[in-house]
Image (cartoon, helix red, strand yellow):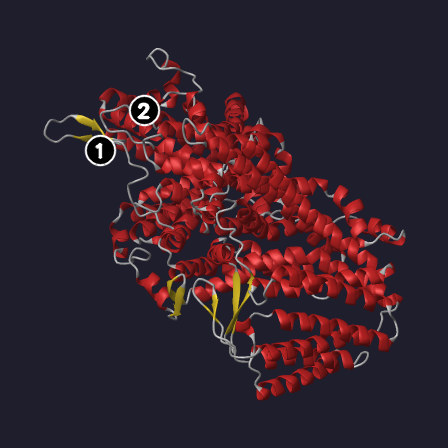
Amino acid sequence: MTATAAKGGPRQPIGKRIYGFLRAIPTWVLWTLVLLWTIPTFGLFVNSFRTRDAQRNSGWWLAFQDNANGYDFPTLDNYQEVLFPDVGAGLGNALLNSASIAIVATIIPIAIAAFAAYAFAWIDFKGREWMFIGTVALLAVPTQVSLIPLLSAYSSGVHMTIPIIERTITLIPDANLAGTIPAVWLTHTGFALPFAIFLLHNYIAGLPKDIFESARIDGADHFKIFYKLVVPLSVPVLAAFAIFQFLWTWNDYLIALTMIGGNRVALPATIVVASLAGEFGAREHLLTAGAFVITVVPLVVFFALQRFFVRGVTAGSVKG
Amino acid sequence: MNRLLVTAIGIVAAVGLSALVFIGINKLFDQAERRFAFFNAIVGGVASLIIFGLLWGNRVIATPEVVTLIATLIGAATGLGLGVIKAPRGRLLIGLGGGAALGLLLGLSVRSPFWPAIDPVAAGIGIVSGALLGYLVWTLTGRKGSKTPHLLLGLAVGWLVGAWLAADFAVTLTEDGVLQGATVGTQAEAVLVAVVLGLLAGGWAGSIPYPDDVTRTSIAAGSRKYIFLVPALLFVIGTLVVPLGRTIWLGFLTGSPRNLEWTGLTNYGDILTDPGILDLSDWTSMFSGRLFWGAVVLIVLGVVLGRWLGRSSGSGLGTGFSLSAGTLMLIAGGVVLLGFSVFVAIRGTIPNNLWWIFSVIAFAVTLGLGVAVLADRSKGENLAKSLIFLPMAISFVGASVIWRLMYIARPPQDPQTGVFNTVWVQIGEWSNSDTASAIISAGLALIVVGLLYLGWRGWRAEQNAMVAGSLALTLPLIFLIYRFLGPGIGGFVINEATGDVVAAPVLFIQEAPWNNFWLMVVFIWIQTGFAMVIFSAAIKAVPEELLEAARIDGATESQTFWRVTVPQIYPTIGVVTTTLIVTVLKVFDIPKVMTNGNFDTQVLANEMWQKAFTELDFGVGSAVAVILFIGVLPVMFINIRRMQKERLA
């Protein structure tokens, strides 16, 4: 770019002006994109405060005219109607279910994966590398391949027929888990583990070797090393995974839909909102408030803990 | 409030219980070293509990609660005895005694349908092969220690299989899981089989010598890897590996969930011949579409421009082809159009999935890389990046609702409330008004002139990137001018009879095949942030010295980018692409919420769900899931190779 200015010679002022204009182009293009990326969410936000008729009669960008047109703006009616069961869709209860699913389905995988990641990183045993690679390779397996067998295991137990003598034995009796929140916990835990182990292992394996050696000389066993040294040192990566997994489980639709199905009391918020969307019309004005409610939690988490979240998303993708 | 309490208690119980079990097991194995008797008692008790619990679950024993409790106590007592007594004879006696007691308990409590009619031949074969097996294991494991325990364990297993499992008992499991059957064996036989089994197993436990200090320490230390790994492996195997195998198996079956029969590859045949899933009949129509020829023109233009600029360029790094944002934009645009022209002609669920993969990768990777590069040299980088990244935190359900709002189409006579249709209809109005279209065309023409001027200056300064970039950007503008002045553009139709201009909103969600693309836009909106964050990190990781060296050698900005930065982030592009392929293949929520697979927007994941859980056709559902799995296999293979290189090198 400097060549342009130099070659311009006597006409440098124009060259400089062009140069300055070119310099500013990236900023302009970037912020145009940012604007495009933000408009959809912003539109939802505005519309969630408008009455049903206002939403039907004009776009959200005309919201400031609502009062002139005789509509109430801003109004909290949509939120009231969608949150409380005696009035409308009963999203309040569903939010509790979502929280219950997301919190447990975050804590259990963290604990289990941290043990496994530690074992893969710092305990020597035969076949460790292959076991690790095999576990992490399962990251790519689509959830769909497990749904049918898992659901039938939850609803009617696990049975195995021994081939030659043709006897069926019950390995896990029918626990009637289908339609309950624990079924969702178990499923999320299993599906989260490959990624969790991968993420935590990368970090835990990178901890300095000396501290483990000196701890062992002091007579600490693996369990002690784990909770006295590894856990405190791994807080950043544990937090990264926790946020990632919390958002994942909070936002999940497929697993909850499959495992909980028709059990109305146990449905999480995503399903309730999706079924509102499926009604096409009747309560469409509630959809904006509902969607915004289920979006607010991730957004708050995102803005408060963005650094950790980015770390969780990028870990392993950029070499390291 | 009540719900809140139940939820909270559930959470605490689930988390607390898992923590307690884990800590308990760790503490238990700590005891193996110093308080071996205690450790042994617990192990004995737990082992009996598991065995009798399994029998309980299979409805084999009567009054299971009492029997299991007694069995646990006997097991614990036997374990305690074996943990205290060191003399071999005493140990053998305790083992035999405990085993006999457990066997007697089992024999007396077994329910009548499970009384075996002993077949001497089967029992004999069982015993002999069991003993042989035990001897074989002893030999293969290096003949360590006495061979008695191995032989006894082998005998126990052989006896169990030969005398009991292979025997006739009249039990059948009916469809609803109830056991039925008439007695074939007698209780005496059951007691005999169980007691002999108990004696053999107890003898095995009793004939293992008392572990010395070294062995006990290695039990305590060596067990850790299992304690740490087993929970994770159990979950992974239980929720991924075994279900995967079972799904593959189910894919070969057909029938109602309770009554499945083997049909071989029929399910796959049905899927692949279903025109809803793969419809190649209309593929020639792509050659008659404008999309296809537009794509050809763009690609040819890009190649010609690149060759021309590359040949005439004299700068140091120049080769036969000038790779720059401009030429690449033309070629990439052409390739995207070409892909679209193919997917518009070839319809069905599988092509839809491929289309998803194609466009999400094309757009998310390009936009992500573009934003990362732009942000690197703009003001307010961090804020811009977090706003672009923000959709990543939003659920697919939430995003679908958000975008439905963008896509809303109201009847032509009403004001449009969706952003897209408002803009589109407005453009249509402008292009039908002479003044508006003249003003817009003039504005666009001014920009074209500016761009051409920039291109000319670039030509003078031998900045090929500027030439190609400006020329590439003028193309769409010229096209727009042509549309405004000529045939018109935007959402309108002209009523032939009256000559009136009527608004014609686009039904973004209903009009096939392009509605597929509008669904993909939602996904691209979400995933661009992901690609951007990763590319941004990768770009910042490119060593500054490399860039500096290139600049000193006289490379322009765009040459530095294309020849230094891009090769450095190739691996990252690969990672982003493979990750996206996996995520896109299983896209489910967006089609489910926005169209539920109607209007020709079906994808495999939703097809699988509908087949399996609404039509309850487990066979076809599983087969579709297997097709999805086959789709990710190449990615899995690539990932494994990459890890191998990193870890085993």
Do pointers 1 and 2 mark residues of a single chain? no
Label number found at residue B150 = none
Q: Residue at x 59, y 34 (%)?
A: B5
Q: Taking the image as drawn, is residue B638 in sight? A: no
Give coordinates of residue A82: x percent, y percent.
Answer: 43, 28
Q: Circle 2 sits on which residue? A: A56
Amino acid of disc 2: Arg
Give coordinates of residue B54: x percent, y percent.
Answer: 61, 64
Give coordinates of residue B280: x percent, y percent.
Answer: 29, 58
Q: Which callout, 1 or 2, points to the residue nearer the camera? A: 2
Left or right of residue B206: residue A285? left
Crowding near pointer 1: few (<14 within 10 Å), some, many (20+)? few
Left or right of residue A242: residue B440? left
Amino acid of disc 1: Pro
Q: Residue at x 25, y 20 (%)?
A: B435
Q: Chain of mark 2?
A: A
Q: CA distance from mark 1 to mark 2?
A: 32 Å
**B309 and B187: which is toward the camera:** B187
Farthest left residue in view? B497
Farthest top residue in view? A68
Q: Residue at x 30, y 26 (%)?
A: B416
Q: Circle 1 sits on which residue? A: B487
**B351 and B234: which is toward the camera:** B234
Q: Quadrant of the C terminus of chain B?
A: bottom right
Left or right of residue A264: residue B77? right
Crowding near pointer 2: few (<14 within 10 Å), some, many (20+)? some
**A236 and A145: which is toward the camera:** A145
Q: Secondary structure at mark 2?
A: helix
Give coordinates of residue A316: x percent, y percent.
Answer: 63, 48
Q: Secondary structure at mark 1?
A: loop
